[in-house]
Structures are given as structure tokens and as C-alpha cells.
Image (tube, grey):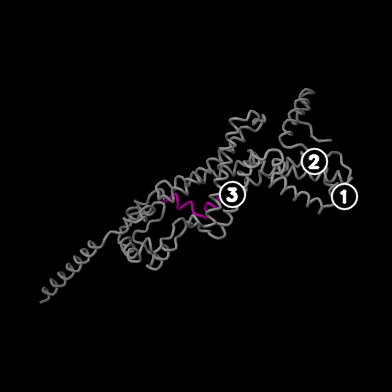
Amino acid sequence: MRNLLIILAAALTITARAQTVELKQTQPEVFSTTNCIGCHGQSAMGGLGPPIAQTKLTREEFLTIVRQGKGMMPGSPVADLSDEKLDQIYTQVGDMPYVESQIPVAFKVASMLTTKSVMRIFLAVFAFAAVAALWGIRYWLRCAGLKELMPHIVKFGVLKSLWIVMKSFVVDGLLVKSLWQTNKFRWFMHGLMLYGMLGLLLADILLSISNPSRGDLDLTNPLKILPIVSGIALFTGVIYVMYRYKRDPYIDNGLTLGKDFLFVNLLLHTMISGFLTVTFNRMGLTGWIMTIYIYHLASITLLIGTAPFTRFQHAWVVPLMISLTRLTEAVTAGKVSLGFEREPSPGRHHKSERIVASVFAELGPEYSDDFNMRYYP
């Protein structure tokens, strides 16, 4: 009797397993027919996205992530993926084997490039660039004679001086009044670069506040439109500048051409890689996204890190020098005694410095580095 019961139980177990296998075989394979495999892999062991084989997520957590999206993963509405299919996907990936050796290198690299780790990298690069920029500003302030100007600023009025400087930063720096008055076409092309770059910076700040996980946004979203339009403007301006490098015989000032060309090329690579990242993501070319994204991050890192040593520095040096010129003119017009009226632009300073250096070199080697330039009316 006992043996009979054992045989009967074994038969029932085999029958149940057969029915389960038959049930699974009759269920359609949904996971492999969706866009999920683009990021999570054919075997659900990951790609651009994490492995989800034998997922530990609850059904509710799985549903929430798929519907709302997470990080670079866009949400999938019911119209694109029904609840019934989503339930089948959850069951199927839960039954798939988890084989750690099948986790692709792309995901391992992506897991290191989290939002926090990328932010730390850029904070370090920004800190380095800021220190280098401040060191450069110190040099130009010395050339502009700010130390000698300070006593006269106190006599003229600190608040009045601050107003003149801030007004100059807006009118001469941000709006580039001098270029508008001399060549409106060049002002427009310069504006494409300047305002395109400011637009991208503003978009990045707004995205950091409203979309810190950097989840995919619809193309009609204002926070998506702003960086796209700004990027197109900046890209157009960069192409024009590169055209000028080819056609303008006076583009070489004899000192910074190589650095200027490095800046423009890094900016071009940053723009191209950025557009490719967005385009490939929209087209579902997930096999290329991580490579292009790393290329984009590397371009931005080099652009920021080299900024204080390339033409990029004119973005803050020129407005600073112009504002000091306006202040010096105002102090002079205010009948406050000065030993000089204005300083030259950075470009003219390079030429003046070379002339002075050559004159002192003629006097003898002991004078070669012993000079301090001042500018008089």
C-alpha cells in the first residue's frame, strides 16, 4: 500500500510539472518581442540597463518602474505595453537564469558612471578649471592696474563703481554692444555661440532641479526643447568660427592660435557627441549609446579642464577688462586723479608685452624678466 501511494504521488508530481511546462510553452514569449531587450539584453542579463533575470523586484515595483521610467529608461504607457503583457514579462524574466558571466562590459562601465559619480568627476574638473581661471584673472587684473585704481574707486564711490561694472557686464559682455555696433552679422553668429552655451548651461541646471535622475523626456517638453535649440545654435556658431579659421587671414594673433583651435575642436566634439547620444537613444540603438555617452563625457571634461588655457577664457576675461575700462573712464570723467585712463584689450596686450620684452632683451639679459607694464593715455 505504501509503495502504491509513493508511485501515485510521483505520478501526480510528474503530471503537474508537465502541465506547468506545457502552460509555459503555450504562453507567448513577450520579453524578446519588446524594446526591453535593447537595454536589458536578450537573456535579461543587462546591457545599457541592469540585469533583470530572476528579478528581486515585487510585481508592484516592477510595474511602477516600467510605467514611470527610471534614470535614462523611459516610461512605457499602457497603449504601448498592456498590463497583461507586462505581467507576462515579469513572470518570464523572473524565470530566466541569472548567469553573472553574461553581464556585459557595457553595463559594468555604465554602473560606474552613475549620476553621483559623474557629478563628482565634473565637480573636480570644475574646481581645477576655477582655480586656473582665477589665477588667470589675477594676471589680467594686475595688467589692468586694479591695485593702483583702488584708492580712486574709494574716492569715486564703491556702490557707484559696482553699478558701472555690473552694467558693463550686461551691456558690453552679455549683449556684446561693441560688436553689434560694428558688424551685426558677426554679432549674430557670436550670439549663437554665446547664448547657445548659456542656454545649455541653464537647461542643465533646470534638469538637475526638476529631473535629477535624468529620466527621458518627451521631445515637446520645454526642458527638452531648450537644450536642443541651444545645441543647434551653438553648433551653427562653431561651424561658422571654423569657417573663419579657414578663410580669415587675420585670425592668427601670433600667440594663441593653437589654443583657440583646440577650444573650437573640443566644442565641436562635445556638440556632435551630445546630438549622437540623444539620437541613438531615440532610435533605440542601445549598443552604441554607452560608447557615445562616454565619448560625450570625455569631450565635456576636456573642454572644461582646458578652458582657462584656451580661447574659452575670453568669455570671462574680455567682459572683466571692458568693465574695468568703463570704470576707469568714469573715474577719470568724475575728476578723480588717475595716473592712467584705460588699459588695452587682451589681444593688444600680447603685442605690447612682446615689444617690451624685445626692448629689454636688447638692454641685456639681466633686464629680460624685470619689467611691469602700465598704460597711460
Mark 3 surroundings: few (<14), some (14-19) or many (≥20) residues within 10 A: some
SS class, disc 2:
loop
Picture residue at 71% right of the left edge, 38% below the top: 182
Cα gap from disc 3 to disc 2, whole angstroms: 32 Å
Quadrant housing the C terminus:
top right
Is the magenta region chiefly helix, strand or loop? helix
SS class, disc 1:
helix
Camera-nearest residue between 85 and 298: 85
Mark 2 surroundings: few (<14), some (14-19) or many (≥20) residues within 10 A: some
Residue type at tag 1:
Lys
Residue type at tag 2:
Gly
Residue 335 location, quadrant: top right
Tell whether label 3 touches label 1 (CB within 8 Å): no
Asked if the magenta segment contains residue 199, the reply would be: no
Question: Over which residues does the magenta segment extend?
Answer: 107-124
Residue pointed to by mark 1: 155
Cα gap from disc 1 to disc 3, whole angstroms: 41 Å
Q: Earlier in the sequence, mark 1 or mark 3?
A: 3
- Residue 124: give its label: 3
Residue type at tag 3:
Ala
Residue 83 location, quadrant: bottom left
Image location (x, y in percent) of residue 112: 47, 51
Image location (x, y in percent) of residue 256: 65, 33
Quadrant housing the N terminus:
bottom left
Residue pointed to by mark 2: 145
Cα gap from disc 2 to disc 1, whole angstroms: 17 Å
- Figure check: 22 above or below 301: below
Picture residue at 42% right of the left edge, 63% below the top: 65
* Of labels 1 and 3, the one closer to you: 1
* Of labels 3 and 2, the one closer to you: 2
Image location (x, y in percent) of residue 326: 79, 44
Q: Earlier in the sequence, mark 2 or mark 1?
A: 2
